[in-house]
Amino acid sequence: MALKATIFKADIQIADMDRGHYADYSLTLARHPSETDERMMVRLLAFALFADPALAFGKGLCVDDEPDLWQKDLTGAIERWIDVGQPDEKWVRKACGRAAEVVVLTYGRALEVWWAGVRDKLSSQPTLKVIEISREVSSELAKLAERTMRLQFSIQDGHVWVTNGRDTVQIEPRSLLGADRV
């Protein structure tokens, strides 16, 4: 018998002073049985960093040809493709051919090894941004995961503060490729 996804509800408030985007979102996240709280919360962070009414979660780990998040225009063309983790470089290059902009939000223990292995192969992709979230921060972010969450994301000068009203995590995303600031 296959295990089913665990459903999480997240009411989030975003105050992105860098982009001038202020909005509330009620999100439903399906966490695949093989997905950790850490990865799910980095997906939620990716949503907050690039929040837009057209941004949506993909089918993620269940489907090979969909990103974790994507934003399409009214014609169905992919404007932004966002993957979380340490995707295969061939998969990232393929995404660069399908979307106007590709973002990889990378985190985790083997981040340095992954980046050393793909940096030269991906550096020629003009539409690609690679953003690092430190492993200490991503594990702190995982501690905010609850089946029903109320979170506030404040973004200013490239820094992110996430709070649930009790605990706050400060995040300093670092651009590895494609942007001076996230």
Image (cartoon, grey):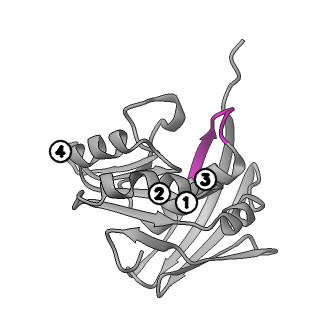
Residue 43 vs residue 29, the one in the foreground: 43
Q: Main SS of the magenta segment?
A: strand
Q: Amino acid at mark 1?
A: Glu
Give the spatial CA distance, label 3 vs label 2: 9 Å
Horizontally, residue 23 falls left or right of residue 107, namely left
Sequence-wise, the earlier of marks 1 and 4 is 4
Quickly name the residue at label 3. Answer: 110
Q: Amino acid at mark 4?
A: Thr
Quickly name the residue at label 4. Answer: 75
Q: Quadrant of the N terminus?
A: top right
Q: Are marks 1 and 4 in contact (CB under 8 Å)?
A: no
Circle number at residue 115: 2
**Mark 1 burial class by Cα count in 10 Å: few <14, some 14-19, many 20+:** few
Quickly name the residue at label 1. Answer: 112
Give the secondary structure at mark 2: helix
Give the magenta-colored segment's residue range: 26-35
Q: Are marks 1 and 2 in contact (CB under 8 Å)?
A: yes
Choose mark 1 or mark 4, whichever is in front.
1
Horizontally, residue 99 falls left or right of residue 149, namely left
